Amino acid sequence: MSFTELKREVYEANMELQRRGLVIYTFGNVSQIDRDKGVIAIKPSGVSYDQMKADDMVIVDLENNIVEGSMRPSSDTKTHVHLYRHFDAIGGVTHTHSTYATAWAQAKQSIPCLGTTHADYVHGDITCTRELTDEQVNGDYELETGIQITDAYQDRDPKAAPMVIVAGHAPFTWGKDAAQSVYHAALLEEIARMAYLTRTLDPHAAELKKAVMDKHYLRKHGKNAYYGQSK
Amino acid sequence: MSFTELKREVYEANMELQRRGLVIYTFGNVSQIDRDKGVIAIKPSGVSYDQMKADDMVIVDLENNIVEGSMRPSSDTKTHVHLYRHFDAIGGVTHTHSTYATAWAQAKQSIPCLGTTHADYVHGDITCTRELTDEQVNGDYELETGIQITDAYQDRDPKAAPMVIVAGHAPFTWGKDAAQSVYHAALLEEIARMAYLTRTLDPHAAELKKAVMDKHYLRKHGKNAYYGQSK
Amino acid sequence: MSFTELKREVYEANMELQRRGLVIYTFGNVSQIDRDKGVIAIKPSGVSYDQMKADDMVIVDLENNIVEGSMRPSSDTKTHVHLYRHFDAIGGVTHTHSTYATAWAQAKQSIPCLGTTHADYVHGDITCTRELTDEQVNGDYELETGIQITDAYQDRDPKAAPMVIVAGHAPFTWGKDAAQSVYHAALLEEIARMAYLTRTLDPHAAELKKAVMDKHYLRKHGKNAYYGQSK
Amino acid sequence: MSFTELKREVYEANMELQRRGLVIYTFGNVSQIDRDKGVIAIKPSGVSYDQMKADDMVIVDLENNIVEGSMRPSSDTKTHVHLYRHFDAIGGVTHTHSTYATAWAQAKQSIPCLGTTHADYVHGDITCTRELTDEQVNGDYELETGIQITDAYQDRDPKAAPMVIVAGHAPFTWGKDAAQSVYHAALLEEIARMAYLTRTLDPHAAELKKAVMDKHYLRKHGKNAYYGQSK
């Protein structure tokens, strides 16, 4: 894939964030990796969606060096790069401050699996990371944010839970490419909203039973999936 | 009615789900039965609303066999078929994961009749089904979901309560045809939202008194109805 | 004003209900009185906003007889007529089931004056009526609904509180004409939403102090008003 | 800057309030100062956004005298003028009754810094002012509202917290010009909404730790900022 094509795909995925109501002003950013070339394309920092063009996307290598582009890349670039280096199977990363997912992050609570909408896309809870120490905050902050996330996946397949919430901050999601990471960001926001409504209606609402969690997740994922047209 | 006409009506009803804000991406599905021909038309599985055409609807018989169509039918087809077999008077079925109705399903609570908006359309509460056993989940899951629903109507007329919520899952609604089942899905979402707001404002808010429940339901339904232009 | 002009104004006011998000499907109705002719124009019963034309409005006299029109008037007509007979100074009436105002009605609670947004438009709380007895429900129900409302205003000027919520049901609002009654319906919904958010954030949030209630109400109303361009 | 240009900028900023969903009807007002000329332009009182033209903006001096304009200025003009006189560094002021920020004002609670979305724009909490005494309410009310606000900033830089909520009333925000004050009003509404959701999910949700508050604020502000393209 040429840099032009990569930037175009990342641009389109970023614009979808705004269309789905997941961002306002300059909030959020999406990237995609070209693993053959060892580079990612990512949104420039602090540019509003209304003024952004495909050619404004910045190409960065996996040591966080700018390879092509006249603008400064997203201030969260190091977090994205860390996720690509650590999670071999992913091709796109999205970061938003979408409202309901961010409320769970601010409450520093993992989102429990309360229903099949959640179970269809995530196997188990949507984890809220541990908090950073003051040293980590004052050190290489954006890299530490990446480490916060990957530490939460030491015993977990990132494909089985392509979304996480960072304590006190906001969500990150990923997928096979930029577009799918945005899709997961939109699903997360809806799942977070349903879980908020459920728990404010009944603070003791219980998690879905394990058999249903497995059933729904496996209807859509893995070799015995039977949802959709071509899995 | 020809298959073409049946598919057209089911397609339009599915598209209405998106216009009413009841679904995102590939969520939800609507079907309609032709009782003379013994077939239903239903949304194909996992197809997004933006790309769907009327001709993509799948024709299935009451033994769940595909009669016409090149795509796989909704993974919830067996639930729909069970409802048509069990509820003689219905002509259309809708399944969504609409936000507020799903929150009640996740809280595993029936929606109590708290006001006349509810009483206008449903006589009594909107029942939350029992949960499935692990065996049922691991057995013929989508058929068992249908049985969960019909079990809740053993002593109840499905026309007097054309909407139900499945515990831990989401709502199903029905009507005389596909379009009316979608209408009931939209009404359910609004009723569920009002009930959520009422109960979070006052967890002990009481049910409407029986006389008002009857009055409002019978203003709109039955031989003495006086709402609307031609009942 | 000719019947044609009266119907046109009432039609436009009804359509505004939909544009403001206060109704779905056939919910709600607006009327306006011509006191010289002793008639009101009102929305026909059970007609959806998308299909309604100005000429569908029904002209009814103050004994609830149809004077002109081929359709059945709103099933709530007797409530409207009672309000016009009882409140001399009003020219328009609106009924909706708008979401937040209806939630307060379902909780059977008056909306306390918690802030200046409320105080700008209503002097004191937005009263929730008493409930009807079973006899009243089974008697002349829509007339009794009107009496429920006027009973709540025995010691109160309807102009100082142009909105009320009927217990277990939904709001009615009024104004100098149909358009202003819709304006009050939209303001009520926003005030109800703010009060809901305030009380779920802090169930003990106190009412605004009397001096601020008076100040804000009198900034906008009465002979010393100084808000706006020409009072 | 000519009066015509000043009025144009203030008009555009006022219209943006409506596009961002921060006002309905005639709610809200925005102003901007020309410090060289010693005048501000401000929205006229009680005019709806749909009918307003740029030339309707009113030019007022810092003694609250009308310098140019045929309409009455916003009834909140004295509050704006007091803020410009007291906060040297600001160039624009916005007042809204946006829903979630107003709910916090009605609950008379400051908005705690619960996450990085807040920390990105405000250093510390978003203060709720003290209440006015009855004497102050019945005195020069709009001036007293300004004093309420500036009293809350005696030990605080208004640039580090360009937004405040007035107890029992609603928010005021400011910025280097009218447009930036509207931007802060929109950010406040989103921050207020996230904080509402967090605290209703967990009433004891803790404030963000100091190190993260500082980190996020200083990523975007001050001489070591590294967010965006040109700071």
Image (cartoon, coloured by chain):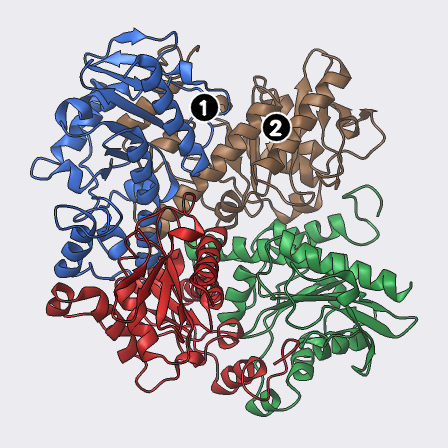
Chain colours: A red, B green, C brown, D blue
Residue visible at 40% across and 77% down? A125
Residue B172: image x %, image y %? 66, 68
Q: Is residue C223 left or right of residue C35?
A: left
- Residue C61, located in which quarter of the rendered image? top right
Tag 1: amino acid: Ala
Q: Is residue D75 in sight in this rendering?
A: yes
The disc label shown at residue B220, or none: none
Residue B25: image x %, image y %? 58, 63
- Residue B169, located in which quarter of the rendered image? bottom right
| Neighbour tally class for label 1: few under 14, some 14-19, many 20 plus, Cα within 10 Å | few
Label 2 and label 1: CA atoms lie apart by 15 Å
| Neighbour tally class for label 2: few under 14, some 14-19, many 20 plus, Cα within 10 Å | many
Image quarter of the N terminus of chain C: top right
Camera-near label (2 vs 1) is 2
Which chain letter matches label 2?
Answer: C
Image quarter of the C terminus of chain C: top left
The one nearer the camera, D119 or C154, is D119
Q: Is residue D134 left or right of residue C91?
A: left
Which chain letter matches label 1?
Answer: C
The disc label shown at residue C93, or none: 2
Q: Where is mark 1, residue-wise?
A: C160
